[in-house]
Image: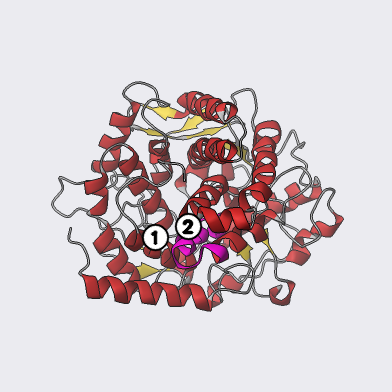
Amino acid sequence: MTALDAPARVDSLGAASAVLRRNWGGQYTVPATGLYPHQWSWDSAFIAIGLRHLSPRRAQLELDSLLSSQWADGRLPQIVYDTRRDDDYAPSATFWGSADLPGSPPVPTTGLVQPPVHAWAVWLVHAQDPAESARRRFLERAYPRLVAWHRYLRERRAAADGLAAVVHPWESGTDNSPLWDDALARVPGTPRAVIDRPDLRHADAGERPSGKEYGKYFWLAERYRDHDCADVDPDHPFVVDDPTTNALWARSELAMADIAETLGHDGALHRAEAARIVAAMEALWDADLGAYVALDRRTGELVRKATVGGLLALLVPADVLPSGRAEALVRTARGPRFLDVDGATPPVMAPSYDATAPDLDPALYWRGPAWFNMMWLVLEGLRAHGLGDAADGYVGPMTAAAVREDFPEYVNPWTGAGHGTRNFSWTAALTVDLLSRTTRPEGSDRA
């Protein structure tokens, strides 16, 4: 896989930067002006990772905006709504009615959350320009909010197994992954709300979750909302330990240690917490698949399906992982399920779902297409384990596909053909990141 030449690199950076300028609203960047007209939680984290190369101050503002929308219990909401666009996305701010929910912030939000990549993003943004960060007291503001966010996961979402559960597929960020099929099968598809689908004005129905799935999504959201989003519903039918959420939680605890130490605090507790999460994730390990899988807490059964999120424990160092685990994850990542480096037609990017699975669909939302944020995370994982040159080999084809397809939401892993909406912010932001930095694992040295 070849790298971009210098002129192509400059042109690609310019095109990606233009997307981020168009999608900037003054305090945060919308994921896409049509399909996603609000602020999304983990989107803002990935967007800030790219923005730090263009404007560290704007990257800080992106994260400041999200962190200021925190609930009293510490959760960072999945969506912060722009009420001027309340008819352009469903479920809307009106559906959630967050002003009537205990502990909600003064701005309208969902009660759901998304994977905790935020502390890592805060650290990377700080490290890009420590002087500007110090001038604006960026870490001083962010750290207590991040501590509260991680405490929410530990105290409200972790059970005896010590892992953070998701209570809705939307919380995983991988909305209709095959990991959720069995748990969703017991969820009614009969919400009280009338389901509007403004998303279908911006993306083909064949690339989006079905109406049947949306019925289940709305039913679950209604049930969670009607229990005040309080995480105290003992009969909530969807409670799943998600490998993506927990791997990013562990990686962000390591970033928290760096933040704490920069502020003159002891980072040992954060490093110990990262090790604890990784140890707890052993309950999700599937040796036959060579990946971490999901655990359905309602049945106690593992969901034995390999997804790209099952590789993300590679984001933590080998000395934190169990012996031999990093090597096994690298074999899986580079094997026929994902990158297939020895295959006749290796993919441009890792599919979101096992390429050897009979129900793979390379065009259908999270059931096979490649996503730029997940591939970026896989590349970071490879770099963290000494495979920087191998990771760099994907940068040229990956960013070329992003530019050629107008920064799509996701792509066919083998052809790079775009799907979903276009001018998607994290695709543009991560293109900026990949083209702007060296192969050194980010955050490996404190600024």
**What's the distance in space between the residues labelled 2 and 1, CA to CA?**
7 Å
Extent of the magenta region? 40-57
- Where residue 150 sits in the image (x, y, percent)? 64, 38
Q: Nearer the viewer, residue 409 or 298?
A: 409
Quadrant of residue 368 in the image?
Answer: bottom left
Q: Is residue 362 left or right of residue 149?
A: left
Mark 2, other Cα within 10 Å: few <14 / some 14–19 / many ≥20: many
The residue labelled by disc 1 is 433
Q: Secondary structure at mark 1?
A: helix
Residue designated by label 2: 49
Q: Position of residue 71 (x, y in %)?
A: 76, 49
User: In this rendering, would 294 be left or right of 308?
Assistant: right
Q: How is the image coloured?
A: secondary structure
| Image quadrant containing the N terminus | bottom left
Residue 291: percent from left, percent from top: 37, 34
Total numbered labels placed on residues in the image: 2
Give the amino acid at mark 1: Asp
Q: Amino acid at mark 2?
A: Ile
Magenta-drawn stretch contains 436: no
Q: Residue at x 13, y 52 (%)?
A: 344
Contact between labelled residues 1 and 2, with CB atoms less than 8 Å apart: yes
